[in-house]
Image: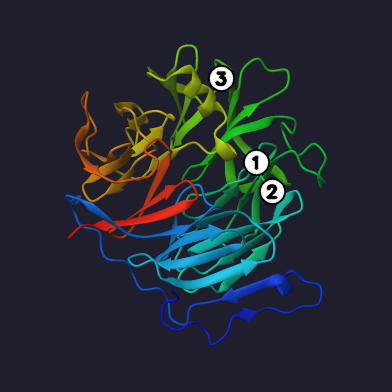
Amino acid sequence: MLIGVLLLAAVTLFGASSDAARTTSEPAATPIPPPPAQATAVPAAFAEAWRAPSDATDTPVVAGNAVVTGDGSTVSGHVAATGEVAWTYARDVPLCTVGSGFDALADAARVLALYRNGEWCSELTALRPDTGTRAAARNPDLRSDTALIGNGTLVAGTGVRTIEVMRYDLVRTLEYGYLEAPVNEGAQPRPTCLHTSALLGPDQLAVVERCPGEPADRLTLLDPDDTKDGRPVERWSVPLAAAGAGLVAVTGDRVAVVLPGPARIVVFDEAGTQVAAVPVDVSDAALAAAAEPPAGVPATSSDVRQLTWWTGADTILLDPESLIPLATVEDTLGPGVTYGDATLVPVPEGLAVVGRSGAGSDPVVRTIPVARADRTAPVRLATQGAVLVEQRGDQIVALVPAR
């Protein structure tokens, strides 16, 4: 059901041969209201408030006051507490993916709708999350294996051959890897390498590269919003001790990767110097999956109080400053999310409540039952105020504290 009254009619943008002629926009007449405030403690139970299809997202998208879904060719902004549709934006071509970004900038939070154009995902529109009105548009050079990841001020479009980074107005700040039509020949340091995983840190882009002729993978740290004469600014690039590496996490001055043979998390400092190597109990199958995560994006979640990485079987809790593993929650369905005074981690039975310290052999304080049709499928979490949002396959499910 549409919230309130949308504009009297769908706003169809006209133009004889333009992309706009194939766009239908139904913005909200009034902005989406704020969600209920999150409590300081985890509730005793959660209840399902609403659900909606979202086959163009792999993780929940929250931006401004909205919970956003992408299904088929339509992006929808929902009221977090009720699921009512406040606005929609649709094209006559399918979505590649939907993301969000720039929430750390004043009045700049955006929903990012990336649409397919043949074999490319090259039609990107930025929408204001509380109304669905268009803020900017651009044509990036991204393939169908892309994801949109952000750090609050920048957004990167991942790719096994090329990675693009954009600022709030969608102007490109970095293009890294193989270029179809390079302006400056020789500007890219390793255009033949494959990017197996990538993460945006607070002010850096970390990439694990697999390069022809090199026996092991390579870890590279780049400036995401600066180039020198069209060339990427590389802070450092170091060969790793093995092939099959996967990114785990990035902070302001640390980068962590997982390596096989034996399984271990290796931490590098801001100069590219290894400062720690900690054994972890990760299976060979999980290591192989971590080396090539979907769209090149590790299953990691982070905030100033807790950082978690999902191996595909277990969730490892990391110190948010040193990136040293603290504890492991076994038999999980995804990474965790901070809620109130704890971290919630999806498990087959529901949600494991992990204490703030996360230390000890068993960090789970209790488990909140949640009924899911598939108790083994991956679950990704996000919060919008007091609303806990789950991505279950191609469905978004919103949970609220039970009364």
Q: Residue at x 21, y 27 (%)?
A: 362
Residue 184 appears in the figure: yes
- Residue displayed at 72% across by 33% down: 189
Instruction: State the residue lying farthest toward the bottom.
Output: 8
Assess disc 1: are there few (<14), some (14-19) or many (≥20) residues with their C-alpha within 10 Å of its C-alpha. Answer: many
From the image, tell me which residue sits under label 1. 159
Q: Position of residue 139 (x, y in %)?
A: 71, 58
Residue occupying image coordinates x 75% and y 48%: 119
Looking at this rendering, what residue extends furthest in the front direction? 373
- Check whether the beta carbons of the residues at disc 2 and disc 1 lie within 8 A of each other: yes
Q: Which mark is residue 142?
A: 2
Q: Position of residue 162 (x, y in %)?
A: 69, 41
Q: Are discs 3 and 2 less than 8 Å apart at CB?
A: no
Q: Which part of the image, by quadrant, shows the N terminus? A: bottom left
| Residue 308 in the figure: left or right of residue 167 | left
Identity of the amino acid at label 1?
A: Gly
Assess whether mark 3 and mark 1 are in contact (beta carbons under 8 angstroms).
no
Specify the quadrant of the image occupied by residue 376.
top left
* Cα distance between the residues tagged 2 and 1: 7 Å
Mark 3 Cα-neighbour bin, 10 Å: few <14, some 14–19, many ≥20: some
Identify whether 79 is placed above or below 230.
below
| Residue position for label 3 | 240
Q: Name the front one of labels 1 and 3.
A: 1
Amino acid type assigned to the residue bearing label 3 in the image: Leu
